[in-house]
Image: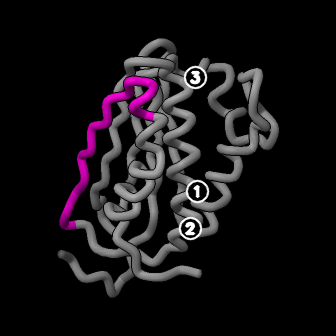
Amino acid sequence: MPEPTDLNALIRETVQLLQDELVQNEISMVPLLDLSLPQIDIDPAQVKQVLVNLIQNSRQAMGRNGTLTLATERVGNWAVLTVSDTGEGIATDNLERIWEPFFTTRTHGTGLGLSLVRRIVEDHGGRIEVESRPRQGTTFRVFLPIGADAIDG
């Protein structure tokens, strides 16, 4: 059920949940959170699922000793969440297919994570974009609408 939510607090809570896994894999976390971002109407449990999926995908793509950057910013009437990693990247041939249910390049996993992520984001009236370069990393940008009555600060 959508409710006014502090996206930055949700990110911090999700990172805390995954902290052990990140530390064990020697992943450096770089938070670049816009503290002036207004609260947005989202289902916190569903958006947390988006974060968990994107962070875990990044962690798996990096293996050990990578850098995970989580950023938020306001762009017009959008709250933009960026999840960026220094992992292996996604092959150009696979970039459009990553959203397909059951598509995976891994030996373990169902291939449902990113299709679920996209559905949740779209159900919130948002969109998700991806940029990736082989051996240089991947960046996902999640755009979530900021309500017309959002109060800054």
The local secondary structure at tag 1 comes to helix
Residue 70 in picture, x, y percent from top left: 34, 44
Foreground tag (2 vs 3): 2
Q: Which residue is mark 3?
A: 90
Q: State whether residue 94 is above or below residue 144.
A: above
Mark 1 lies on residue: 49
CA separation, marks 2 and 1? 6 Å
Q: In this view, which residue lies farthest toward the top?
A: 135
The residue pinned by badge 2 equals 45
Kind of residue sitting beneath label 3: Ile
Would residue 9 be found to the left or right of residue 102 on screen? left
Q: Position of residue 56 (x, y in %)?
A: 54, 38
Q: Earlier in the sequence, mark 3 or mark 1?
A: 1
Q: Quadrant of residue 86?
A: top left
The residue lying at 62 percent from left, 29 percent from top is: 95
Name above or below for residue 107 compared with residue 12.
above
Q: Tell me the amino acid under the disc marked 2.
A: Ala
The reply to whether callout 3 and callout 1 are in contact (CB within 8 Å) is no
**Eyeballing the image, is 96 above or below 124?**
above
Instruction: Count neighbours of disc 1 (C-alpha within 10 A) and say few if under 14, some if 14 to 19, many if 20 or more.
Output: some
Q: Is residue 30 magenta?
A: yes
Question: Residue drawn at (63%, 52%), measured in percent from left and top?
Answer: 118
Q: Are marks 2 and 1 in contact (CB under 8 Å)?
A: yes
Question: Separation of disc 2 and disc 3 at Cα?
Answer: 27 Å
Residue nearer the viewer, 55 or 100: 55
Magenta segment: 22-36
Bin the neighbour count of mark 2 within 10 Å (Cα to Cα): few under 14, some 14-19, many 20 and up: few
